[in-house]
Image (cartoon, rainbow, N blue to C red):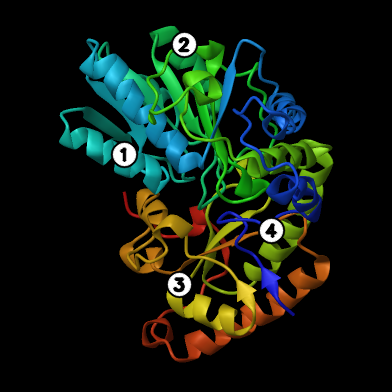
Amino acid sequence: MQVYLDNNATTMCDPLVVEAMQPFFSEMYGNPNSLHKFGTASHPALSRAVDQVYTALNASDKDDIVFTSCATESNNWVLKSVWIDKIVNGDKNHIVTTEVEHPSVLAACRFLEENGVKVTYLPVNDQGVVEAHTVKSFITEKTALVSVMWASNETGMINPIDEIGLICKEKGVLFHSDAVQAVGKIPVDLQATHIDFISFSAHKFHGPKGVGALYIKDSQELTPLLHGGEHMGGRRSGTLNVPFIVGMGKAIELATANIQETMAKIRTKRDRLENALVELSDTFVVGDRENRTPNTILISIKGVEGEGMLWDLNNGQIGASTGSACASADLEANTVMLAIGADNELAHTGIRLSLSRFTTDAEIDYTISHFKGAVARLRAISSSFALQKPTKGGSVQECELHH
């Protein structure tokens, strides 16, 4: 059996999405900016895709949603354009973000620091969540932007976006969220939340890779990241990727239809897997289940290196991760686990398991069996674990943390 449990890295493209995309590769292939019928043939499908995205997120007609290549582009667009608009050409000099953002946000912030911007990296609590009052305490008159991810790609923990949005509104500060791990997994209602920008990618909710979007509240001004044409109303230059945009529209429609029912089914499987794994001694899961995306487990297993566990799981045809796929070549300790206070040894043992709506009960059964066998095999050759006294597994609060 092959089991894919790395759905926070990317997801299988839903066959219905592939079907919707197919005609736009070799049948209706014209450039949609062309005036002839080959170009205009795709306009109805593009309009439908736009409507599908607006509907799924409950965006207002006054808002803009601009298709990009991915959320990394969207994140860079917001951070670098706010720098130009509010700092280089304004009177601000400060951005607030967190220690546990996706590398595309953190690397962009490091770039801005090299260019004179002051960036504050907020700590998270022992659940891996940034607290709203912490955000408030670091906003100053010089703050141009607050950027806080909606949900963590590594732990699945959900940040208090509504509260942070109200604080930013009160302070007159722009608010951006990397919502890659939220859209399509939990309800996202943009008219119920004060937020200026959100970034998201289709391949996280069973759409194609290579297409994402940026939501811009009230169609406010934002200097383009890419120049060279009048595509997307002058917002983003580049020929529209018609098949992928069509696929993104179909994927977000499928992901958000009956989302509460889908969440409940995924959560049931996730909880069954998690309950079985924490029966092992010296295992710790990061974060409270009730404030976590329903598909995610970040589990630490004392005496078992994360890379060794991945190797054993891979031999058993199970795909998992030690964290963000965008940093998977880096074998350093898990930065999120370090941020919540885990010691360096424990932070090397984190394994992320992330389910999807296509995960089956049989796959969960197989994973439980193989995972427990892998832990036994790897602990048997671990000199450090042999010297430890076993303790009962549980949540991260039971783990010995330093602050």
Q: Quadrant of residue 244?
A: top right
Check disc 2 and report its element: helix, strand or loop: helix
Q: Quadrant of the N terminus?
A: bottom right
Along the horizontal axis of the image, is 339 left or right of 364?
Answer: left
Earlier in the chain: of badge 1 and badge 2, it is 1
Q: Amino acid at mark 2?
A: Lys
Check disc 3 and report its element: helix, strand or loop: helix
Q: CA distance from mark 1 to mark 2?
A: 24 Å
Position of residue 154 relative to residue 89, above or below, is below
Depth check, front residue: 14 or 133? 14
Q: CA distance from mark 2 to mark 4?
A: 38 Å
Earlier in the chain: of badge 1 and badge 3, it is 1
Q: Amino acid at mark 1?
A: Ala
Near mark 3 (Cα within 10 A), the count class, few <14, some 14-19 or many ≥20, is many
Earlier in the chain: of badge 1 and badge 4, it is 4
Q: Is residue 331 visible?
A: yes
Q: Position of residue 317 (x, y in %)?
A: 64, 79
Near mark 4 (Cα within 10 A), the count class, few <14, some 14-19 or many ≥20, is some
Check disc 1 and report its element: helix, strand or loop: helix
Q: CA distance from mark 1 to mark 3?
A: 28 Å
Q: What number is the disc on residue 108?
A: 1
Q: Amino acid at mark 4?
A: Met
Residue at 41% of width from left, 18% of height from top? 222
Q: What number is the disc on residue 306?
A: 3
Q: Amino acid at mark 3?
A: Gly
Q: What number is the disc on residue 169?
A: 2
Residue that label 4 marks: 12
Near mark 2 (Cα within 10 A), the count class, few <14, some 14-19 or many ≥20, is some
Q: Position of residue 357 (x, y in %)?
A: 77, 54
- Nearer the observer: mark 2 or 4; the answer is 4
- Nearer the observer: mark 1 or 3; the answer is 1
